Amino acid sequence: MPDKLNIAIFASGNGSNFRAIHEAIIGGKIRNAQIALVISNNSDAGALEIARGFNIPAMHISRTQYRSDDEFNATLIGALAKHHINFIALAGYMKKIDASIVGAFRNRIVNIHPALLPKFGGNGMYGMYVHEAVVAAKEKLSGATVHIVDDEYDHGIIVLQKTIVVEPADTAETLAARVLNIEHEIYPEAIRLFAEGKIKIENGKVIISQ
Ligand code: GAR
């Protein structure tokens, strides 16, 4: 077994993906992992409330509280170090992670995106905008993607993906709800694979052993 995953969740919103991962851990589906810290840029985030309910340290850290990017990123890095974080899961975090953090956690930051990357990703493609774009493009398929975070938005190596059919009657809202359900399946599954040491990144490719 590799070292236990000591996870920090970064979340801006409701926190349902964070909850799905935490429930998989406490329900015994994911072993060798714990969520040790939740960080949000948004003081009202449901994710912070969920964390407090579970007695998980919860911090509101926003760029607006600091005079410079450097000060903000140093605060994030300080919080991660204080809680001995060795893995980061972005779960509905709507801000870009600075290169200094990506560099310090190379191949140890994952994100969930509500579409089939590389389609419908990139700057401005988040939350409901993604589903609106998928419906407007009359896509036949959509889904969710777990990927490694690198220096570009929604760009890193894909770890897991699951596809669903877009029905002709789907609106962005109905599609979002079905995609969210599959996010709650594949995100805990991806974390389990990391926690069990079953994911290796070699030459820019993911190798998964079951
Ligand atoms: C999820 O659908 C997630 O994929 C999306 O935000 C939602 C957060 O929901 N993330 C992005 O769009 C990032 N580009 P949650 O707060 O209930 O987990």
Image (cartoon, rainbow, N blue to C red):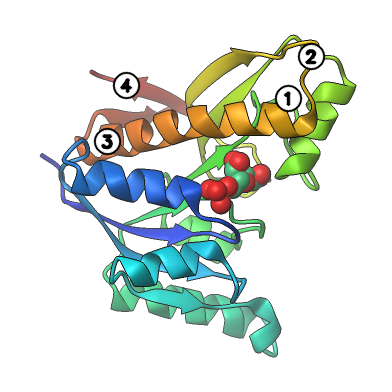
Which residue occupies the foreground of this view, 199 or 120? 120
Q: Tell me the amino acid under the disc marked 2.
A: Glu
Q: Where 199 falls versus 12 (above or below)?
A: above
Q: Quadrant of residue 207?
A: top left
The CA distance from mark 3 to mark 1 is: 26 Å
Q: Is mark 3 within 8 Å of ligand 1?
A: no
Nearer mark to the viewer, of 1 and 4: 1
Is label 4 in contact with label 3 (beta carbons under 8 Å)? no
* Numbered badge on residue 139: 2
Which quadrant would the N terminus be assigned to in this image? top left
Compared across the picture, whether 50 is left or right of 135 comes to left
Tell me which amino acid carries mark 1: Lys
Outermost residue to the right = 136
What is the spatial separation of the Cα atoms under label 2 and label 4, in whole angstroms?
Answer: 29 Å
Residue on which disc 3 sits:
192
Mark 2 to mark 3 CA distance (whole Å): 31 Å
Residue 32, given in percent of the width and then of the height, sits at 15, 46
Amino acid at circle 4: Ile
Which mark identifies residue 119? 1
- Front label number (2 vs 3): 2
Q: Which mark is residue 205?
A: none
Helix, strand or loop under label 3: helix
Residue at disc 4, secondary structure: strand
Q: Secondary structure at mark 2?
A: loop
Question: Which residue is situated farthest in the left direction here?
Answer: 1
At horizontal 59% and vertical 76% (from top left) the residue drawn is 43
Image position of 146 with respect to 125: above or below: above
Vertical placement of residue 209 versus 130, above or below: above
Sequence-wise first label, 2 or 4: 2
Which residue is under mark 4? Answer: 208
Which of marks 3 and 4 precedes in the sequence? 3
Locate the C terminus by quadrant: top left
